[in-house]
Amino acid sequence: MLSRLLHRPSQTRSPRSIARLLVITLCVATASLGCHAGDEVDSSETAVTPASKVNAETNAMSKSDSVEPQVVKTIVGPFNPLTPEEAYVILEKGTERPGDHGLTLTKDPGTYICRRCNAPLYHAKHKFVSHCGWPSFDDEIKGAVARHPDADGRRVEIVCANCDGHLGHVFEGEQLTPKNVRHCVNSISMKFIPEGKELPAKIVQPESKSDNTSEPTDKDPAKD
């Protein structure tokens, strides 16, 4: 389609065909550049889909997702082991390649949890298809995601609030959904738990004791 539009004589191009050409060109350019750590891409380069289309796809997802609060169990212990590919993204703040693989196009009702510690991060009702090449969410489970200034000085990094595992970046002002927020998350940073299936226990680390603490004593030094 793109080649046909490019080779059509300019006098026969309608305004509608020119608009379609611009959208397709932006999609191709964005998918090839990416929007995560290490990629020199501005957030302005990632708004590639008309808001009306995104809203329609978001509504289609959320209608089938009635979120029932679940009791999340907590255990103390080591975090889940990671493969080299998972560690590169989650621990070293790398980026997986964009595309329709992984959880990018998942529309089933359920919960997205942190791959490293099992902490619930997003409900399926928060997810929408942005066509940026990575899973996109316009909200998070309260208190689940922390924000930090990115090392590039331009973007805002998002991490799991429980284990600090790298998730991706958050962008605002793109007008893709009514909430006007897009969490751009690496698929490899998450696991998807379908609705109706019990969530795994969230893994937390034991609290470290302060070296300054001392045992209380009733001994009076003046009596020594």
Image (cartoon, helix red, strand yellow):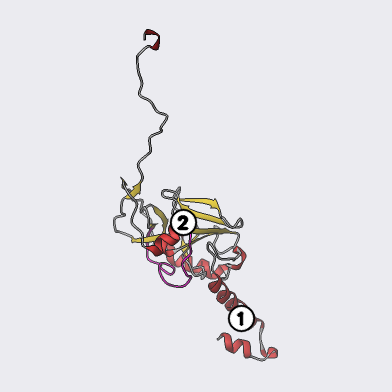
Secondary structure, magenta segment, majority class: loop
Q: CA distance from mark 1 to mark 2?
A: 35 Å
Relative to residue 37, is residue 122 drawn left or right?
Answer: left
Q: Residue furthest front?
A: 224
Q: Is residue 44 left or right of residue 190?
A: right
Left or right: where 48 falls relative to 62 = right
Q: Are the residues flagged by discs 1 and 2 in contact, CB closer than 8 Å?
A: no
**Quadrant location of the C terminus?**
top left
* Residue at image coords 34%, 52%: 79
Q: What residue is rendered at 46% in x and 67% in y?
A: 96
Picture coordinates of residue 69, whole percent (x, y): 36, 51
The first of marks 1 and 2 along the sequence is: 1
Residue that badge 2 annotates: 166
Q: Amino acid at mark 2?
A: His
Residue 143 in sight from this viewpoint: yes
Quarter of the image where one finds residue 198: bottom left
Q: Secondary structure at mark 1?
A: helix
Label drawn at residue 220:
none
Amino acid type for the residue under numbered disc 1: Leu
Q: Quadrant of the N terminus?
A: bottom right
Q: Report if residue 124 is visible in the image.
A: no
The question of residue 208 being in magenta is answered with no
Look at the picture and state if 205 lies above or below 84: above
**Relative image position of residue 25 (x, y in whole percent):** 59, 78
Q: Residues within 10 Å of mark 2 (few under 14, many from 20)?
A: many
The answer to which of 161 and 68 lies nearer the viewer is 161
Q: Which residues are magenta?
A: 93-112
Label drawn at residue 21: 1
- Percent x, y for residue 54? 52, 68
Q: Say whether residue 102 is magenta.
A: yes
Residue shown at 41%/32% (left/top)?
Answer: 211
Q: Position of residue 106 (x, y in %)?
A: 40, 68
